[in-house]
Every structure is written in structure tokens, then in C-alpha cells.
Image (cartoon, grey):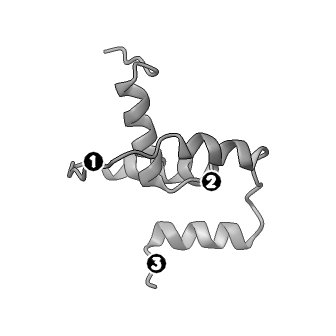
Amino acid sequence: MKLDEFEKEILESVENNEWISKDNIDKRKKELKSYIKKKKAISIRVNESDIYEIKKKALENGVPYQNLIQILLHQYAQNRINLSF
């Protein structure tokens, strides 16, 4: 598998033991599974730097970045996140 520069940086960071496992893995898995429902594919354009930050935060939380985006959208749709403009 070919890695992009971001993925290479992450791999190197992991190999250098710069990451620490989160506690309560079972609780986190259960929480993430609660978001699994029928999915609809969408296509959006997102600022590259935002994707970089989302990928970074996803890695910090031990979840694929697409799942993090799904979680955020779900929480907003359920009025669990409020936006201020």
C-alpha cells in the first residue's frame, strides 16, 4: 500500500512510540457502534488543512477519520452540537 506524506508522518510517529492508548477501549467501541445505521454516500469538498486536522484528531481518538466525520454529523443532526455563527 502506498502512503501519502501525512500517513508516512503518522506511521513514523507510531513507530517512535509517540502515541498512548486511550483508556476504556470497550466503552469507546460500544459508543462508536451506537452510531452504526444505514449509510448514504455523499460527496463534499473540504479544505485540505481541515482534513489534515480531522485525521490527526481521529488518530488521537483511535477512530478512522471518516467515522469521526460521521460522528460529528450525527451529533449535529441530533442537536448534541450547537454552532455559533
Q: Residues within 10 Å of mark 2 (few under 14, many from 20)?
A: some
Which amino acid, mark 3? Leu
Identify the mark nearer the N-term, 2 or 3: 3
In x, y percent, where is residue 39? Answer: 31, 49
Q: Which residue is mark 3?
A: 3
Q: Secondary structure at mark 2?
A: loop
Furthest residue in direction top, as rendered: 84
**Mark before the other along the chain sequence, 1 or 2:** 1
Dot 2 amino acid type: Gly
Q: Residue at x 59, y 66 (%)?
A: 10
Q: Secondary structure at mark 3?
A: loop
At label 1, counting other C-alpha atoms closer than 10 Å, the crowd grade (few under 14, some 14-19, many 20 or more) is few
Q: Residue at x 44, y 29 (%)?
A: 75
Q: At numbered mark 1, what does the secondary structure look like: helix, strand or loop?
A: loop
**From the viewer's perspective, is 52 left or right of 21?**
left
Question: Measured from the top left, where is residue 34 in percent x and y?
Answer: 53, 40
Number of callouts in the render? 3
CA neighbours of label 3 inside 10 A, class few (<14), some (14 to 19), many (20+): few
Pick the front one: 69 or 85:
69
CB atoms of marks 3 and 1 within 8 Å? no
Q: Is residue 44 left or right of residue 29?
A: left
> Which residue has dot 2 on it?
62
Judged from this view, the residue extending furthest toward the front is 38
- Looking at the image, is 79 positioned above or below residue 17? above
Give the residue at mark 1.
46
Q: Earlier in the sequence, mark 3 or mark 1?
A: 3
